[in-house]
Amino acid sequence: MAESGLNRIAFFLLVALIAYAALSGAEVPAG
Amino acid sequence: MAERYSGRYSPGASASGATADPAAAAIRRVADRRIRRLTLFHLASLLFILSAFTGPRAGLVPDLAAFGLLGAAGWLTRHGLLAEAAYNERKVARRPAVPRKLFAAILTGAGLFLGGFIPGESLLVPLGFGIAGLVLHVLAFGPDPMRDKGMEGVDVYQQDRAARVVAEAEKQLDDMEAIAARLTDRDLAARIGAFVAAARRMCRTVEEDPRDLAAARRWLVVYVSGARDATVKFADLWAKSRDPRARADFESLLDDLQSNFAARTTALLEDNRTDLDVEISVLRDRLKRDGVLTGPTDT
């Protein structure tokens, strides 16, 4: 299957979602 | 040892190694690119390790579990993409036995659910993460191939047998390519590559029409393994003695094998045409007898 723009956008959104889910649980020290 | 540089456009480059079929090569390229991009996915899931050790203590276990699940999801996605590429390259293929990308999507959802989970708080947020992860994974990588293709009128039992013979032959051919890569002699490697390509064409032909197995079995089993053994022996000898006579003998053996494999593959394809001719003439006779076709229709 060829890769469409939707595939690519969804992939980057997925990566962003993972990063957000991980970082929202981390306690970032207040600076 | 040193090896002369050679790129895609160097003389003789196309004869060795590279896949003969440009469509298959394009499919591989897309799959490779998507697999490389998975690195980002793994990097993002690494952040869960950070979160596990900097967040509240209760989040440690769920965060580590999320990291593990996402790692497994990435691995499954990789294999799902490889299986899909193998499926797309072939005209005749059965669907992969395990829908790897689908399982990967579920694992991604589960991982994000656990990763977003905070003890004592509402489950709505982690559920949202999980569902969004599942949906995005499906959108990003698509569904697995779910249907057999080109299997009409093919005996599944016979196809299994053909697939086993072809898999064994491909293993031997892989060995030959590995040996060729170690020879550090471009011409020899190209010779071996050309033979391997001819043999692989026969493999594809048999895969596409397993009825050819009977005619091709001896070639794919006996001659391919013979060629591999000869290559191993020659590589040993060549490494020690650089005997030009042995080299000439080996090259002429490869030439013979290659032209015979090519001729045999053509014959197999011709067979298919004979089958078609028979099919057509039988149907024509039938139509004529039933009075559907009238007049001189023999073309």
Image: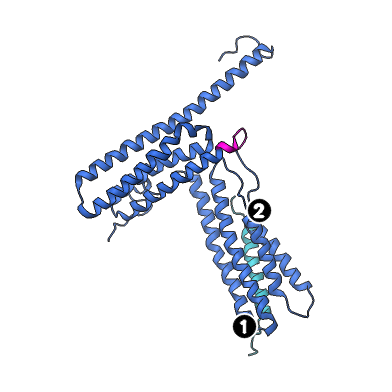
Label 2, residues with CA under 10 Å away: few <14, some 14-19, many ≥20: some
Where's residue B223, x and y in %? 37, 39
Within 10 Å of disc 1 (Cα), the crowding (few <14, some 14-19, many 20+) is: some
Residue B239 located left or right of residue B19:
left
Chain-order first, disc 1 or disc 2: 1
- Residue B91 appears in view: no
Identify the element where label 1 is drawn: helix
Residue B150's image quarter? top right
Q: Element under label 2? A: loop
- Picture layout, residue B281 above or below residue A17: above
Q: Which residues are magenta?
A: B151-158
Quickly name the residue at label 1.
Answer: B53
Chain identity of mark 1: B
- Residue B62 point in image, percent of width and height: 68, 76
In the rendering, what colour is chain A?
A: cyan
Residue B189 visible in the displayed image: yes
Residue B64 in the image: x percent, y percent?
63, 75
Examine the structure image and report whether residue B222 is included in the region drawn in magenta: no
Task: Locate the C terminus of chain A and report the quarter of the image it occupies.
Answer: bottom right
Drawn colour of chain B?
blue
**Residue for badge 2:** B143
Taking the view exactly as shown, the residue that stands out farthest to the bottom is A31
